[in-house]
Amino acid sequence: YYLRLSGVAGIVTLFICFQLNMKLGRVAKAADKTMQSRLQDRTRVIKQVCDSIKGIKFYGWEESYFDLVSVKRRIEVDSITYFRVLQTCNVVLGRSSPILATVATFIVHTAQGKELSSADAFATLAVFQTLRAGMIFLPLSLTMCGMIYANLKRTEAYLSIAEAGTGIEELPDASGNLVTMVSVTSGWHGADPEDEGVGTNIPKDCSFDWEESRARQRSLSSEAVPESPTIACVTATYELTATADKSDINSSSCSGSSKNEKGNNPVLLEEGGRENGEIFELKVGSLMVTRGSIVGVAGHVGAGKSMLLETILGGAVTLIRGQVSVGRSVGYVPQEAIIITGTIKENILMGRAFDQDTFNWAVKMAAMERDLTVLPHGAATVVGERGTTLSGGQQARVSIARAFYGRPTLLVADDPLAAVDSLL
């Protein structure tokens, strides 16, 4: 009002500063998303290192993993620094915008040859200073809104993940089969064959067949492998597809091993069982397991044995297409025993109602009777985190007893005796 048209210059300056704040806010939001992603990468690597610390020490891989963690941390620090610089620039610009608007107003007013009195100057300063608080909190609120939006998107993506076991049908109790699979294609979460690049450049020699594997075992062993009339497996193929570089596909083996072909240094697989964007898929034409049968699945490392079991259980593996039907009562013994902090009895029950006869039978089936007599408090012996007070074989047998305690009609075991002494 006092400076007439000269005040328009100050308003234009505020508008320009506001637009710059908006632009910096959008860039800061993208930088925050990148920072969170790199934080997850670094945390994932550290978790894998902590979980495999014994193997790292035994193989002398400390320096390799130290370099790997250092690289991940350096990348994370760079993204944090970039985000903080953007955030600081946004705040500084917001705080200085009233001053810049005042200076621009005075310059335009004097450039017109008009006299700038002290009364007009202080009145103009008072007007623009009233906007100072708002211009300070505006960039902060924009940055915080961007961070909240990014976190909400991550939460939405997590909550939008399909429920485990989607597509797994339940067989009635009267059925003579426990597992039926027809034209099944399964893969780790995110393996969608409709996505661009997935399903192309499949190695022709990358297949796994139970009949071929069994014949190969006969030729290599003097003992004949017993036939199993209780399992029918037709056109079972294991394929390795990838969305990564074609050169990686051509040099990859269908075993899915995590060995680095270019050197002896260890390679950490990314989340979801991928390395450099590779996606593992298992294809089964037909498979049937009848009641009362004992079925064994054999194959080389990475042939898809565990993925087959995960497909039956409907766990970490996504059923992409096909039909899978499984019995109602299922027991599962994983490769690595899951032990919680508590007593051996609590680890076997896992919150289920206690029945002495069933408990004794499960302990007997897992060959743990002698262990319970040797342990100081028997079944009441407290087990530390990750089974620190138990040997590897004892942990595996606790897991077996847990599966038997539920008296399942279908027992799925993924190499449960690897850590158990052969005499047992």
Image (spheres, grey):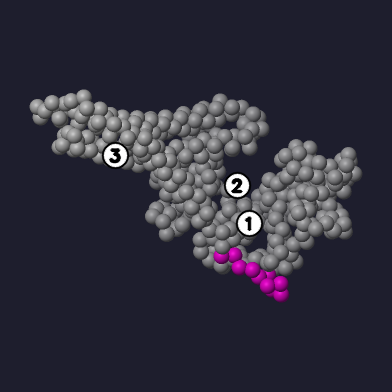
Circles 2, 1 touching at the beta carbon (< 8 Å): no
Q: Amino acid at mark 2?
A: Val
Residue 168 sits inside the magenta stretch: yes
Classify 360 as above or below 277: below
Residue with the mark numbered 3: 18
Q: What residue is pinned by disc 1?
A: 309
**Magenta span main SS:** loop
Q: Is residue 110 left or right of residue 121?
A: left
Contact check, label 1 and label 3, Cβ < 8 Å: no
Disc 2/disc 1 C-alpha distance (Å): 15 Å
Q: Image check: 77 left or right of 102?
A: right
Residue 336 colored in magenta in the image: no
Please tell me which residue lies in front, 132 or 201.
132
Numbered disc 1: secondary structure: helix
Location of residue 19 in the rendering, given as x and y in whole percent from the top left corner: 28, 40
Q: Which residues are magenta?
A: 167-177
**Residue count near mark 1 (Cα–Cα under 10 Å), binned few <14, some 14–19, many ≥20:** some
Cα–Cα gap, marks 1 and 3: 57 Å
Q: Residues within 10 Å of mark 2 (few under 14, many from 20)?
A: few
Check disc 3 and report its element: helix, strand or loop.
helix
Would you name the residue on which mark 2 appears? 301
